Amino acid sequence: MKQPHDEPDGLVFDDWYRQEYPRVRQAITLAIADATLGEEATAEAFALAVVHWARVRVMDSPTGWVYTTALSQVRRSWRRAALERRHAARTRLGEYLPPPLPDTTLWQAVAALSPRARTAVALRYVADLPEAEVAQAMNVSRGTVATTLSRARQQLAAHLQTLGEGDRR
């Protein structure tokens, strides 16, 4: 009798999960600048991966699918939060305040990037996805990813250089 973890012709979910989860969580968290939502979106994406494992494990890039799914979860959460803020404003329940970001120079520099640039940087450099997979996860062209990353690197270099010059004064 075949056991749930016997998968001789493909990835074994448990091994794949242990290897990929920390990197996916870190990249998504960096991309969206929200540790709690990053953790939730990543967990939800992997939960969907296990439910659909027979289909996901034979994909060209199961990890790319998880990134795409996690980012979709984030977008749904942002839409829901926007609706909640509008409702709160109408009912005067107060304004939604996001959790504070970690206080590091690099994190601040990345957080200052546009959402698209943050996402591209996180998926390319933290998750170490090739540009083609970053493009697929972000639902943009590979050229858009390359341009976004180039501009983001320039912005980060300028920001970090400005901070470094301030330290020398």
Image: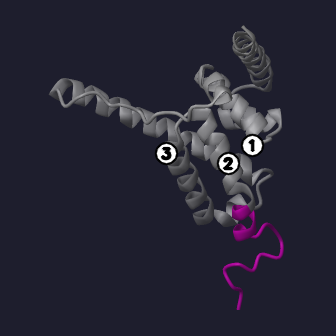
Residue type marked 1: Ala
Q: Position of residue 140 (x, y in %)?
A: 69, 27
Q: Position of residue 76 (x, y in %)?
A: 46, 39
Question: Residue 117: which quarter of the image?
Answer: top right
Distance from disc 2 to disc 3, alpha carbons, whole Å, reads 14 Å
Q: Nearer the viewer, mark 3 or mark 1?
A: 3
Q: Position of residue 63 (x, y in %)?
A: 73, 51
Q: Please, what secondary structure does the residue beneath circle 3 have?
A: helix
Q: Is residue 9 magenta?
A: yes
Do callouts 1 and 2 mark residues in contact (Cβ within 8 Å)? yes
Do callouts 2 and 3 mark residues in contact (Cβ within 8 Å)? no
The residue that disc 2 covers is 24
Determine whether 80 is above or below 156 in the image: below
Q: Residue at x 74, y 32 (%)?
A: 135
Q: Position of residue 88 (x, y in %)?
A: 23, 30
Q: Residues within 10 Å of mark 1 (few under 14, many from 20)?
A: many
Determine whether 4 is above or below 121 in the image: below
Disc number at residue 36?
3
Residue type marked 2: Val
Q: Residue at x 19, y 24 (%)?
A: 90
- Asked whether residue 157 is in view, the answer is yes
